[in-house]
Image (tube, rainbow, N blue to C red):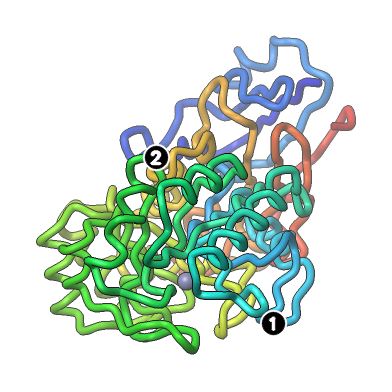
Amino acid sequence: MSTLITGASAIVGGRLAQPVLAGDSILVKGGKIDRIGFAADVAREPHDSTIDVANAVIIPGLIDPHTHPVLGDFTPRQNTLGWVTAHLNGGVTTLISAGETHWPGRRRTPIGAKSIAMAAAQSSLDLRPGGAKLHGGAILIEPGLSSADFDDMERAGVRLVGEIGLGTSIDADRIRGPIEEARARGWTIPLHVGGASVPGSHVVSGDLVVELNPDVVSHANGGPTARPFAEILRVIEGTTVAIEVVQAGNTRALVRIVEHLNREGLLSRLQFGTDSPSGTGVMPLGILRTIAYATAFAGVDPVAALCCASGEVAARYRLDAGVIEAGRPADLVVLDVPLGGQGGTALDSFVNGDIPSVALVMVDGEVVVQPSRVTPPPRHPPIVSGGC
Ligand SMILES: [Zn+2]
């Protein structure tokens, strides 16, 4: 099965080092990206079907690295079914768990935390809600988790650490052992920084970042309560960790943090998440909306912001996703100006503060969304011929 996607006004590559690719067409074969280039060359290759995107922008499937799933497409936090599929309709093809915090009766013990992470990881291994790739099962670190516990978790498919700060202890000396176990296995370490979130969580200051040296500062703009800006600045300037801002955080802090990173040439450290489902809600458009904030309020180039939400975060979490490149999974999103919107392309929509229209989503070469049920309709719907 092969599909030619053609007629793009721009193709966003996904990495800040190569943000825009030369060409207007992508050939997809067997679920993978085969070739990228101009129609005059690429269209000569045999293909079963064609998608004309009518001047829209093609981007890699977006990644939300800060979600709180429980099992599959159900979350008890908002009594909601179908939230992962709704995210997919918002252009997010990959969701990463930052911890199954909403698990009913979550036990804050080594065996409790380990059991939940293993069950959630097992559940998400073969599950594709709506077609989305959900990486569930993130261990919420508890003092006393042993090397043997990590062996068990690894066998069950656990590859993620939940945001540190949601377990019983934030005493660096008591949680350093399990954190180093996870780090040695190549698992990415996020640290919750900010005021307390759900009942039973802690206020975590920026000082712990320096002590524990995580890979990511989760919701530097608060989840949902922000720490003082001077403290966040000390973290940005005193470390090299990735700085995440989330839709469910403090919007004023988000704008100040992103402005600072942009001004200082530190966009390679910027990460966007939703921190959902949470008390703020289920937010299918959370990633697109956060990109619009970064672009319209903090002056970030929209292509760079899209890279921060795709290839850059995939590299940080060691995932084969988020990049448009030959041989990669064909997880692609077609963005257009929303019907009635201003500007020539979806990139102008972001600059204008609008949420673009998600005209089509493809996962592993298969069209799973057309059009989105959560964005406005596109100015020019893609034309599919040949059936794919
Ligand atoms: Zn969170």
Q: Residue at x 50, y 59 (%)?
A: 139
Q: Which mark is residue 78?
A: 1
Q: Residue at x 41, y 79 (%)?
A: 223
* The C terminus: image quadrant: top right
| Residue 203 appears left or right of 266 | right
Percent position of residue 45, x then y:
70, 10
**Mark 2: few/some/many CA within 10 Å (<14, 14-19, 20+):** few
**Looking at the image, which is closer to me, 336 or 363?**
363
Q: State whether residue 291 appears in this view.
A: no
Amino acid type for the residue under numbered disc 2: Arg
Name of the residue lying farthest toward the right: 387
Q: Secondary structure at mark 2?
A: loop
From the viewer's perspective, is residue 15 above or below residue 158?
above
Q: Disc 1 vs disc 2: which is toward the camera?
A: 2
Q: Residue at x 60, y 36 (%)?
A: 8
Pointer 2 residue: 185
Q: Which mark is residue 280?
A: none
Name of the residue lying farthest toward the bottom: 199
From the viewer's perspective, is residue 327 above or below residue 172?
above
Quadrant position of residue 119: bottom right
| Residue 37 appears left or right of 380 | left
| Residue 42 appears left or right of 353 | right
Amino acid type for the residue under numbered disc 1: Gln
- Total numbered circles: 2
Percent position of residue 188, x then y:
39, 49
From the viewer's perspective, is residue 277 above or below residue 59?
below
* The N terminus: image quadrant: top right
Percent position of residue 9, x then y:
55, 39
**Mark 1: few/some/many CA within 10 Å (<14, 14-19, 20+):** some
**Looking at the image, which is closer to me, 177 or 369?**
177
Q: Residue at x 58, y 40 (%)?
A: 155
Percent position of residue 217, x then y:
31, 63
